Image: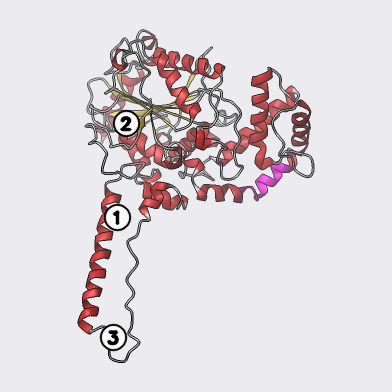
Amino acid sequence: AIMAARYSLIQALLMVLGEAVLERVILVSRHGERQRLRKHANTLSEAGSADGGPGLTQLGIQHMKSVGTELQRRYFPPGCHNERAMCLSGIDSSPAYSPGQVWVESSGLDRSLMSAVALHNNLWVDMNATGGLSVPVHSRSDTDDHVLRAYTKCPSLSASIARWAQSSEFHSQESASSGLRERVAKALKESGAEYSHVNASGSVPLVDWWNAFDAMMSYNAQTGKVPVSPRDFADAAKLVAWLESRKFGTNISQNLCGGALLGEIALRLSADRHAPRLVHYSAHYPTMLCLLSAVGIEEDDHSWLYSSIMPSGSVLAFELHKADGFGSWNSSDSWVHLKYWDGSVRLPVWHELTLPCATKRTQHPLSQSCNMVEFLEIVSRRSFRRVGTWCKACNNTEMPACQGLRMTCATKPEVIKSTSGTAGMSTALVAIVASLVSLIAGACSVVLLYRLSSSRQGHLRFEDEKPPIPGQSPTRIGTV
């Protein structure tokens, strides 16, 4: 045990001194600045999502290109040489896009798809592998997305949010913010901003505060003006951050809306060397907050992170490091770091977040990270490995994948009794029918078990799926 501890300490010191290799990076980012959006206060469903929802503004497109430039600086030469252990191994130093080394996935909404395209147009210097086209961005139907958009499809989460809205904590905030909400309602009406959901007392309902705040942000983007005083705008931003961090925090959301994504990230981090080195999920700030909750990141330990909504273009990065010359990257010889950048391109600052396992090593050189074994132990407790488990936890019976898991065979045939005294079914015939019913039920069970066992993290596997690439889980997602 003493030798093992010394070995681990030597690895840690090598990483601290920069003698380490960055083997793999998983990025989860928020889309760029978008047009006006409206959400349902409890279900979090969005108006127009079936048609792709609002797209990016021109400013949003340019910003996401700048985010791509910063990621290139961080992970590829020459910029990465200014950072310790930041140069991503296994990818041409150009950097050149390589299909086998890069995987880009987005939620199925216009703003996240556009953000992914804009970001990767600037991330790569050499795009010869795409024939001059944009990097392929993979997606799934929004109606069946429980990985990046689980927060809109989880009745259990909606019920938890509704219960919280009746709590003493919520009512206390309602009382404290009543004056602000009245002033904002009046200002939005006078300015002509697109918001009309005002309650009988003439204020914005606290449960609908996000929509009022988004109306202010959209008004600001269109006119360059803020419809309220600077003080009220600052207080409005703090209030919406409080609301959203509570909704998607560990107490309310737990792992319901981030557990499936956490499972996919773990699969990709721990895959073999044939799997992509850089994986990017283009998503939304609730996706990111839900993921942090699933990991077990507590708001009390990172209050600065929850003091405002994660800005457009912000990034969470799971970085897998290994001390050069030591062991396997899929063992205790490798370390997982979780970094956050708020998307500010003028002065990019990356912060390291403290993973739950790290609290045991407060004096360790890598006191904020987990080795891979520790990280996978967290994942085993807090992720959803199968879509059926998530469907049950979220009480979702409507999503297509959840309906597929509820498939049943024909109902048991009813034995019709004869109305005559002598024409009833014989005992032998009854036995034959009962045997057939049992065989059919058994066959249904086998089919259902097969579908469950052959489903990958995130969806049911269908017959037309191609075999997975070595090191990469099978996927049912198309290129757009």
Q: Residues within 10 Å of mark 2 (few under 14, many from 20)?
A: many
Task: Give amino acid for label 1.
Answer: Leu
Specify whether 465 is left or right of 338: left
Chain-order first, disc 2 or disc 3: 2
Residue under pointer 2? 269
Residue 371: mark in rendering: none
- Residue 479 lies in the magenta-colored region: no
Q: Main secondary structure of the magenta part?
A: helix
Q: CA distance from mark 3 to mark 1?
A: 35 Å
Question: Which range of residues does the magenta coloring cover?
Answer: 163-174
Residue under pointer 3? 424
Nearer the observer: mark 3 or 1; the answer is 3
- Residue 172 lies in the magenta-colored region: yes
Percent from the top left, x then y, of residue 135? 36, 20
Residue 448: mark in rendering: 1
Seen at 28% across and 13% down, the residue is: 92
The foreground one among 74 and 299 is: 74
Seen at 25% across and 64% down, the residue is: 440
Q: CA distance from mark 1 to mark 2?
A: 30 Å
Percent from the top left, x then y, of residue 364? 38, 28
Quadrant of the image occupied by residue 326: top left
Task: Give amino acid for label 2.
Answer: Leu
Percent from the top left, x then y, of residue 75? 37, 16
Task: Give amino acid for label 3.
Answer: Gly
Seen at 51% across and 20% down, the residue is: 343
Assess whether mark 3 and mark 2 are in contact (beta carbons under 8 angstroms): no
Percent from the top left, x then y, of residue 171? 70, 46
Specify whether 426 is left or right of 122: left
- Disc 2 is placed on an element classified as helix
Chain-order first, disc 1 or disc 2: 2
Specify whether 339 is left or right of 266: right
Nearer the observer: mark 1 or 2; the answer is 1
